[in-house]
Amino acid sequence: MNEIFLRLHTFLTGANKAPVSISEEVVNQFGESCKAALRKQFTDERKKEFTLRMSNLGKNTCQLQAEKLGVVPEDLPYNFKIKMILGDLAEALVIVLLKSSGCNVQEEQTPVTLTSPVGSIKGTLDAVIDGMVYIKTASPYAFATKFQSADYLMKHDDFGYGTQGYGYALATGRPFGGWIVVEKSTGDIKVVEVDPDKDKQVEAQQVVLREIQATTQTVTNSTEVVRCFDPEPELWYKKPTGNYILGNECSWCAYKKHCWPSVRKLPQIPSKAERPKEFWYTHVEEQKVDES
């Protein structure tokens, strides 16, 4: 069992049985983090100009191009701010648990700069524990689908978690440890470690550095949005229906209607379920479609 997870598990199990010790300093730090999260999500009036940062470098280049070129995104759902601040608060809580359970938290929320031949990229790393960089995240979707193992995540890294982690490692000259993940709705925790082997760390960092350089050049020189993905054929019992839908990468994107002006969100057309799952359709074969 991972040492960090073991410490967290032991601390939380003990807290279920009897009061535990949390220093007043840690309590006050948590309070300051909560206040900062409120200000960031609700009262910060500064208009943020687009810049490439560690936190967005893992996004698809077409999305970054749209942001850079000022394409108007879709309206956010009413609960977006709640989701964001819950993530901020969950991450602040993780730091409390790490410190109180005896983990060696050496740094937290540290500003860093990665210098490369194509420019400097700034960011804020989450934590350094025992000399290794760790990234925290609190997405229930990612918890369930992405964080199965480090190898799996790196092969299905739609949100750039690997880019961030190895990028921060490059910027600080430290090895990358992995991800500490909290599922906000259940409180479950995972610690997903990457291979600590020095040669493999260097190899992974160099791959990420090349990706960062390529993304930086592409986005910096962009004059239009170039779509990265094509629609996928809809399959029903493994057979194509003739309809086409957006994949996950495009379905999550706030700029999909820029790339696909006629896209429509519809209940899965061939399904006879009472409440079928909805998909974004770019093409529908001639048939009656209930859009009510």
Image: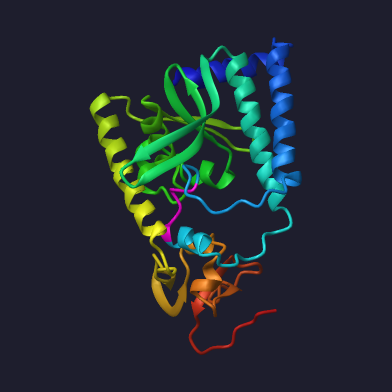
Left or right placement of residue 245 versus residue 155 in this view: right
Label tally: 0
Residue 219 or residue 268, whichever sits in front: 219
**Residue at point 43% right, 48% down?**
58
| Residue 58 belongs to the span the image colors magenta | yes
* Front in this rendered view, residue 241 or 199: 199
> Who's the residue at 33% across and 41% down the image?
116
Position of residue 247 relative to residue 115, above or below, is below
Assign the C terminus to one quadrant of the image: bottom right
Could you say where residue 93 lies in the image, as x and y percent from the top left? Answer: 65, 27
Tell me where residue 186 sits by quadrant. Answer: top right
Task: Give the percent coordinates (x, y) of residue 187.
Answer: 63, 33
Observer-nearest residue: 100 or 238? 100
Q: Quadrant of residue 229?
A: bottom left
Left/right placement of residue 138 relative to residue 86 reads left
Which residue corresponds to the image point at 56% horizontal and 30% vertical from the top-left?
Answer: 189
Magenta segment boundaries in residue numbering: 56-61
What kind of secondary structure does the magenta stretch mostly adopt?
Answer: loop
Visible in this render: residue 173? yes
Q: Is residue 117 magenta?
A: no
Rendered position, 182 above or below 173: below
The foreground one among 72 and 248 is 72
